Structures are given as C-alpha cells and as structure tokens.
Image (tube, rainbow, N blue to C red):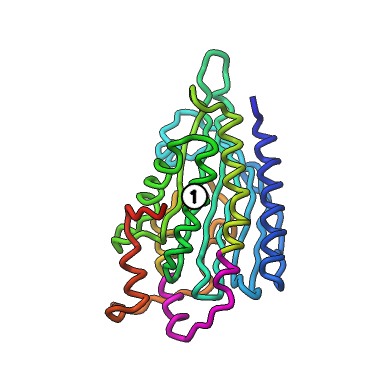
Amino acid sequence: MISKEQIAADYQLIQDEICAALEVTDGKASFEEELWEREGGGGGRTRVIQNGNVFEKGGVNFSAVHGHLPHTMKKALNVDQDDFFATGVSIVIHPNHPMVPIIHMNIRYFEMPSSFKPGQQPVRWFGGGIDLTPHYVIEDDARYFHSNLRSVCDQFHHDFYHRFKLWADDYFFIKHRNETRGVGGIFYDRLTASDELSWEQIFEFSKALGRSFVPVYTELVIRNRNKDYNDDQQLWQYQRRSRYAEFNLVYDAGTRFGLETNGRIESILMSMPPTAKWVYDYHPQPGSEEEKTLSLLKKGVNWV
C-alpha cells in the first residue's frame, strides 16, 4: 500500500517542478520560500512569487500536517477519529494583465492513521481540482483548458471529466452573486479505491492532474500576455478579483480547513488577490465584453 510519506514526497517534487516552470514563464520574478512548522504537528513550504513580468502575486504551497481534529472539523468531515494526516500542493496565480486568467489548483491527500487496523476499512481519500477564472472569458481559451482536463481524466476513467466538471460547476459557485467564479474546471473529493481503480491509480491521477498545470497555464499566458489593455479593463480585472476574494473567504473548504485546524494564516490567505475593488452597484455596458463575460459565468456550459 502506498504510504503517506511517499505521497508527500511526490507532491513536494511537483511543487518544485511547477515553481521552476513558472519562473521561466515570468522571466523576471523568482519564488521566495518560507519553511514553517505547525504547532500541532507537521509543516510546509510556502513559496510566493510577486511583482513579475506577468505574475503580480502567486503562491505554490506544499504542506504535510498532522495532529488532532477539532470537534467542528470532525463534524464537518463526518468522522469519528481524532487524529489526521493531510498533505497537498495548493496553487493560486494572480496575473497583472487583465487578459491573462487567474488559475487555481489543488491536489491533496487525507487519512486518519488510527483507522488503519486489521479488518477495518481505513479512512483515507484523495481530493483536488483545477479551475480557471478569466477576467474576460475568451471562449477558445476556455475550450483549450477543458479539452486538456478531459484528456487527463480520460486516461484514468471514462466518467471522471463529466462527474468532476459538474462537481466544479457546483463547488465554484458564488451563491450570493448567482454566478460561477470563472469557467470552472474539475473538482473532486473523497476519492477512494474501488473495483475500477486502485489506490496507486488514484494517486497517479492526482499527480497527472498536478503535472498538467504547467503546460496548460503556460500556453494561456503566452496567448494573452502581450495583448494591449486600457485602464477600464484593468478596473474590470480588479472588480473580478473581488468576486474571487468573496468566494475564498465565504465558501472555500480549504480555507475553512486551514483556519479550523490552526494552520498557518499567511499560507492559507496566500490565495487572496493583491488588489481588488468593490465598485458599488456596477453594471456593464450592454453589448460589452464585460457583459459577455458575465453571461458565461454560469453552470452547465459545455466547453468540450
């Protein structure tokens, strides 16, 4: 059986690969690393890139933490045991260019070591996802993004893309705005071994998703980084960032888990944009690209 140590080691390698590639793509900024320890057990590597040619702020974080779950998290996760181990890589990139999209990815593993007893089904699962939040929805880019996700999913299960795309539509939804955070992607949680897939295959899927990040996002950056933009378009970028912040603070399960388990605040809130604006009662001009973008921020858009 694949061990939590091996999972954590492979996730660290993926963090290294992504950071190296993003530095090359930006061409100016480098990641700053901070090693940290969690008071309850474990720690991680926070890596932040700022003020680059393309990336205004971004983070590629690794963590492997363990300890005891507070009662609120036991209830939320619907588990009986107290002890836990969790490891993963979490990424959020906020570009400085309105035509380059925000991107988020997370791959993670969770287990409760005390459940690993003879004759007992252990409590363990994989989760993760990747989603794209364009400030302006460029339909060809959205189709490219989803086509690549489908290719990754189809390598492992014929139904993964369909299931996880619907899950992402529901998860990355800002209820109080009645709009999706972006053009979606895939999202999954509590993925366990079955008659169709072994633990090793699920882990390989997790790593394949992680390694899809670099080629997909690099292509989207290259497509858009040299386009001209004006002050109004940048204001719209800041307006869309405010929606991203609202989702992360109100609905995001990873943020909640980190705060409830006494995680490192700077790492948890790394996902927040460096600048955002809340324009009162904003309405886009009829027929504008801003209005078109809002019309596509809804569930059930079939991009492939």
Examine the residues drawn in magenta and state their main secondary structure: helix
Give x and y (percent) for residue 288: 33, 79
Residue under the point 44% across and 81% down: 233
Q: Which amino acid does label 1 sit on?
A: Gly
Residue under the point 32% across and 52% down: 300
Instruction: Say which of 45 and 11 sits in front.
Output: 11
Residue picked out by circle 1: 254
Give x and y (percent) for residue 8: 67, 40
* Region of the chain picked out in magenta, as a range: 220-241
Residue under the point 37% across and 51% down: 169
Query: Callout 1: 10 Å neighbours few (<14), some, many (20+)?
Result: few
Give x and y (percent) for residue 61: 63, 54
The answer to whether 181 appears left or right of 126 in the picture is: left
Is residue 203 one of those drawn in magenta?
A: no
Give x and y (percent) for residue 41: 64, 41
Instruction: Say which of 155 and 80 sits in front.
Output: 155
Q: Quadrant of residue 167?
A: top left
Residue under the point 45% across and 58% down: 143
